[in-house]
Image (cartoon, rainbow, N blue to C red):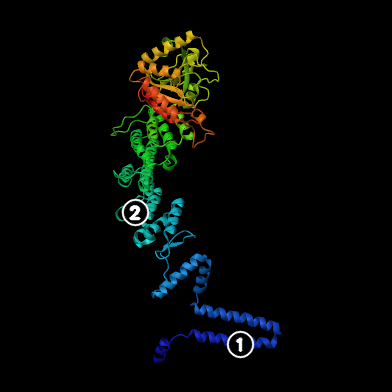
């Protein structure tokens, strides 16, 4: 029993004794082989045996399981920056008396495989969030959540933790992880309010709208993107940034409601944008600085209006907002208050949404020949060769609706066009067919009146035109806006003075009178997008004096060009008076 206990308690053979036994065996084998084999074979056998012994020593030193070799291979797979970062971490831990620690926050990425509060930077975390969002990687998003919400404190990333939390919330909303988004936003709002940026708030609002969380989106808008304090300069960069992203957030809200078929909420957002526009102008921001997505908003309004016409979309309950005859007019009113960039794509979408059908109705030579006054009407008047027909074609986005000619006085009658009438009504005008149906709510007439001055017509016909025009202006009940076109190169002439005098005496008070300066591109050498036309100060001064002398008052003046499409937004702003008859 004593021997058995001694044997049980004795330690196993050491690694050294095992290796010594192998070494003795190796020498005996090598010595015997040298007696029976040539020198070369003996040398090869010696080399093979030596390698086997060396391998045995390595395995013994690694514990027999190859962990050292695996660790060496893992280090060889790391990139140079990762090796340097690992070396620095090991030195720091050795200096502090700590053993190297395996990172706990591992990611499914080769470029950024893990996160550590000691070695990871804000850019590393941001790239990891973007990758998780783009690939919809829920595991990586959960790892980043634990790292930002539990591991690091406010000193991480030199104070940019609030920005990382907002980016994490946006990614969580993109992946429909509402709980994570709520926790990230709550910590950002409570701990990092002084460092919140308007750009991040606008992105959060877009994410909340994507989740159909309109209530929280409006709360963020009123809390984080409120208007600047009164008395503070609007041209301050911080206030400019605040106004810009508030406008973009309102544009996102309006667009989302239009595409979701909620016209009342969308029109309410457009009204808020219209109130914000003057502040944008006062702050000095340009159209390119603001970057408003007008084209998308217009398309959303046009889609919503299409559903409204066929009855599939109705006004929102509980929202006390008056809807216009066409929802695009709400967007147009907001656009009119913002700086304009005269973007062709935007105004092509606008014209297509507001002018879906346009037909020539009739040509009248007296008041009895005018079409029935069953809708609003906008008239264009001016001397010959001033560009009336070209302007009508521009605002309706048609090339040959009104006939244009280089010969002055081509228009010999009052030409009436109907906009958004009953589909197929052209058959009624051409063949006398009876077309059933109703006109659209935003239907109106456009009247192209004949020009004077350079028209080569007899004096008797001139007198008849003048008498007809006076009667038309004074008695036409559905006339809502009268555009008086003046050549922007030369200013008003005698014929323009006579028209102003007639307007001052005969035009009813409920009719809007607007002076339009045409051919502004002729005053610019090589007109381009940045300089699409202008009018001299002398022309404006002379025009103001003529308006004052003829008693028309301080009426609006619009600078236009049919070539560069300048001024079409302002023209449409007054055309809406005829559509909303």
> Whole-percent x and y of residue 432?
48, 12
Visible in this render: residue 353? no
Image quarter for residue 103?
bottom left
Gap in angstroms between the C-alphas marked 2 and 1? 75 Å
Where 358 falls versus 190 (above or below)? above
> Whole-percent x and y of residue 334?
37, 34
Where 471 falls versus 400 (above or below)? above
For numbered disc 2, what is the local secondary structure?
A: helix
Image quarter for residue 510?
top left
Q: Nearer the viewer, residue 302 or 280?
A: 280
Q: Which of 288 and 65 is in front in this view?
A: 288
Task: Left or right? Give the position of 217 relative to 565.
Answer: left
For numbered disc 1, what is the local secondary structure?
A: helix
Task: Left or right? Give the position of 89 relative to 72.
Answer: left
In this rendering, the label closer to the viewer, 2 or 1: 2
Q: Which of marks 2 and 1 is nearer the N terminus?
A: 1
Sort mark 1 into few (<14), some (14-19) or many (20+) by Cα contacts within 10 Å.
some
Instruction: Name the residue furthest right.
Output: 38
Q: Which residue is tagged 1?
A: 27
Where 496 falls versus 346 (above or below)? above
Q: Which mark is residue 427?
A: none
Q: Which residue is tagged 2?
A: 195
> Whole-percent x and y of residue 534?
47, 31
Sort mark 2 into few (<14), some (14-19) or many (20+) by Cα contacts within 10 Å.
some
Instruction: Name the residue furthest bottom.
Output: 2
Tag 2 near tag 1, CB within 8 Å: no
Image quarter for residue 147?
bottom left
């Amino acid at each position: 029993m004593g021997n058995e206990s001694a044997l049980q308690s004795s330690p196993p053979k050491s690694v050294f004794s095992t290796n010594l036994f192998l070494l003795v065996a190796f020498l005996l084998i090598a010595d015997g082989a040298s007696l029976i084999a040539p020198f070369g074979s003996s040398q090869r056998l010696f080399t093979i045996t030596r390698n086997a012994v060396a391998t045995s020593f390595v395995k013994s030193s690694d514990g027999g399981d190859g962990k050292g070799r695996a660790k060496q291979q893992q280090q060889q797979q790391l990139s140079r920056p990762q090796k340097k970062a690992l070396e620095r971490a090991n030195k720091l831990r050795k200096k502090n008396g700590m053993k190297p620690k395996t990172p706990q926050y591992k990611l499914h990425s080769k470029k950024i495989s893990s996160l550590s509060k000691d070695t990871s930077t804000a850019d590393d975390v941001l790239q990891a969030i973007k990758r998780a969002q783009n690939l919809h990687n829920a595991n990586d998003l959960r790892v980043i959540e634990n790292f930002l919400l539990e591991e690091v404190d406010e000193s991480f990333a030199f104070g940019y933790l609030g920005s990382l939390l907002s980016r994490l919330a946006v990614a969580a909303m993109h992946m429909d992880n509402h709980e994570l988004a709520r926790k990230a936003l709550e910590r950002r709002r409570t701990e990092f309010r002084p460092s919140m940026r308007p750009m991040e708030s606008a992105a959060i609002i877009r994410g909340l709208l994507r989740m159909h969380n309109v209530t929280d989106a409006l709360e963020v808008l009123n809390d984080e993107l409120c208007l600047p304090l009164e008395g503070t300069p609007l041209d301050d960069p911080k206030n400019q940034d605040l106004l810009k992203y508030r406008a973009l957030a309102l544009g996102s809200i309006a667009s989302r409601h239009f595409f979701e078929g909620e016209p009342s909420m969308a029109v309410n957002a457009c009204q808020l944008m219209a109130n914000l526009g003057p502040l944008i102008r006062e702050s000095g921001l340009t159209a390119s600085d603001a970057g408003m997505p007008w084209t998308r908003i217009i398309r959303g309004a046009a889609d919503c209006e299409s559903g409204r016409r066929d009855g599939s979309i109705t006004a929102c309950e509980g929202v006390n907002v008056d809807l216009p005859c066409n929802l695009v007019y709400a967007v147009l009113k907001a656009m009119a208050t913002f700086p304009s960039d005269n973007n062709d794509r935007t105004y092509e979408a606008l014209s297509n949404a507001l002018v879906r059908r346009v037909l020539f109705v009739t040509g009248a030579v007296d008041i009895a020949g005018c079409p029935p006054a069953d809708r609003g009407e906008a008239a264009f008047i001016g001397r010959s060769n001033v560009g009336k027909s070209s302007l009508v074609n521009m605002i309706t986005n048609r090339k040959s609706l009104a006939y244009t000619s280089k010969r002055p006085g081509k228009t010999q009658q009052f030409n009436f066009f109907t906009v958004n009438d009953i589909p197929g009504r052209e058959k009624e005008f051409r063949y006398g067919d009876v077309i059933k149906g109703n006109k659209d709510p935003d239907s109106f007439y456009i009247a192209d009146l004949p020009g004077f001055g350079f028209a080569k017509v007899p004096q008797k016909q001139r007198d008849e035109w003048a008498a007809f025009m006076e009667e038309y202006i004074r008695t036409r009940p559905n006339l809502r806006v009268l555009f008086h076109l003046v050549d922007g190169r030369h200013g008003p002439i005698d014929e323009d003075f006579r028209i102003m005098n007639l307007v001052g005496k005969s035009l009813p008070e409920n009719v809007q009178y607007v002076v339009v300066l045409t051919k502004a591109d002729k005053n610019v050498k090589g007109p381009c997008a940045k300089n699409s036309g202008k009018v001299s100060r002398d022309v404006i001064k002379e025009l103001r004096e003529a308006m004052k002398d003829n008693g028309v008052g301080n009426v609006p003046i619009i600078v236009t060009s049919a070539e560069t499409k300048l001024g079409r937004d302002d023209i449409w702003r007054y055309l809406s008076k005829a559509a909303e008859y």
